[in-house]
Amino acid sequence: MDSKYINNTVKFVTDALNKNTCVQKVLDTKFVKEHPNLAAGAAIGAGLLAASSIYKLSTSNTGKRYNYDAIPNLSFEEEIYDVATIGAGPSGSVLGYYLAREGRSVALLEKKKFPRDKFCGDAVATMAQDILRDMGVMKEIVDENLGHFAQNGGFVSPNGNSFIGNSAKELKRDAKYNRGAVIAIKRIVLDEKVAKAAKRMGAHLYENTTVENCTFDRQTGYWTIECVESESENGQQPKKLTYKARVLVCADGSPSSTARKLGYVNTEPNGICSRAYVKNNTTFRYDGVVFYPKSLLPGYCAIIREARDELNYLAYIIPGGKVKLDDLNHYHHEYMKSDPFISKALGPNPDIERMKAAPLRLGGIKKSYDDHLLIVGDAAGFIDPLTGEGIQYAMEGSKIAADALIEAFNERDLSGQSLKRYQDRWMNRFGHEFNMSMTMSLFLYRFPIVLDAAAKLINKRGSRFLAEWAAVMTGMKPKTWFLRPDVGPLIVLEAFGIAVERLFGRGQQQKSLDQN
């Protein structure tokens, strides 16, 4: 047996005997004092049985949490987690779920108490849907009528060309997909469901916990995470809390607060989105429509149908155009009144909540790993620069991170060189798509006529073509689809035709979504 294992075990048992008052109380009982030999024999037998069990666990080839090398220098008073995740949103909780499923000890440190809200488009695309099904969360959401699968939708181009079709029906006809592209789930519902699923799997969820400082000790290989209660009860002084872990995962959202403090991210978020729920709407008949006002490009507005017939009105400011992040409030409210399509969709005097907003970090960061550290989800910039969609990339990226960490633990190598596999894998899975999205975003800003042409082409080709478009925009298909000879060149030809019509004054703007 390894001397390191023996020393750690002896230290652990010694600390327990010295510090545990329960043991002392047993030794002081009348029975033990009157039958010392019998008590000693029982203690020796129990000790041998415990030692045998520990030895079997330590020499097993499972590579799971009982590997003694994964938890050196244990003391009786503190637990060393394999992984501590700052943030228990979709990225942090998915990571915690899959690590716990493999037997790893995980601490999820969440600033707020569930249920708590987050501001985004609430659109959950197919990669995330697959993970939610695997976790058992999707069934809960469907059974409780807390999500709405989009059946129909479309978009309105800068010049007013539009098309609405049943993309979900077309996608379900295709054996490759056999499902709709998007389900709308409010974040106040989704985040709690995913966090509680991770907790049921064995992750330790610590709510109401604000992380103040993180330090790494290279000698011990541990992170020390100093925290404080976010809100104390009855006006009392907030409690100070400390956690230790072998791996720190930054999953604290687009501001990337922890990664910035540690020096891994040095830029501000480069996008922003608004959100406003609308109740009692009777004029909008679709499940999701994207509007591309020319002045907002490459950003956009959207209206998405939520469960129980609520709507979600959104505005996205995406980098690459003239619009600044500080302009969000103006454009969010301006388009409600001045855009003919958005104002008609919302109806007169809409019952709409006050605008709320959240920053976006789009396109992925250059380095999301280091020794004993990973950065995941929005904190790592896992948001598509063309669509602003981030939930599915946060969840898929965290599943990739969990796999990488499990392998690293089994290999007993948590160095940056070992954890680089995480960066390589998410880049191959969706990082290169982000690069193409950024290029397309800039292209659409410079040539908005392309969106006019696309809408015109979709009108000619019908719902099947719209379904293909939706599959690309939601990550089901790669954006190289636009380069296909039966797609890209046809859009270019339509754009040329529109340009000629405008040159001779014959270009017409479509006036209503209801024409489709």
Image (cartoon, grey):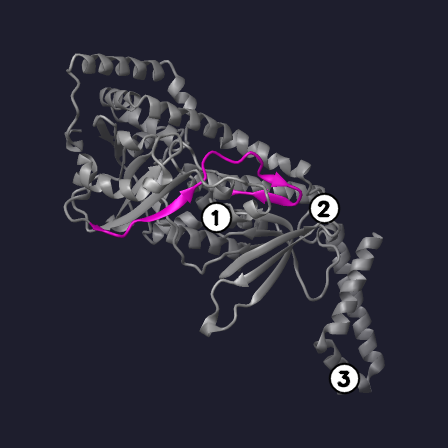
Residue 406 in view (yes/no): yes
State the separation of the CA atoms marked 2 and 1.
26 Å
Q: Badge 3 is on which residue? A: 28
Label 3 Cα crowd, 10 Å radius (few <14 / some 14-19 / many 20+): few
* Badge 1 element: helix
* Badge 2 element: loop
Q: Which residues are magenta?
A: 351-376
Mark closest to the chain's N terminus, 2 or 1: 2
Any magenta on residue 356?
Answer: yes
For the point 70% across and 77% down, the residue is: 22
Q: Badge 1 is on which residue? A: 135
* Badge 3 element: loop
Kind of residue sitting beneath label 1: Met
Q: Badge 2 is on which residue? A: 61
> Residue 307 location, x and y as percent?
29, 49
Kind of residue sitting beneath label 2: Asn
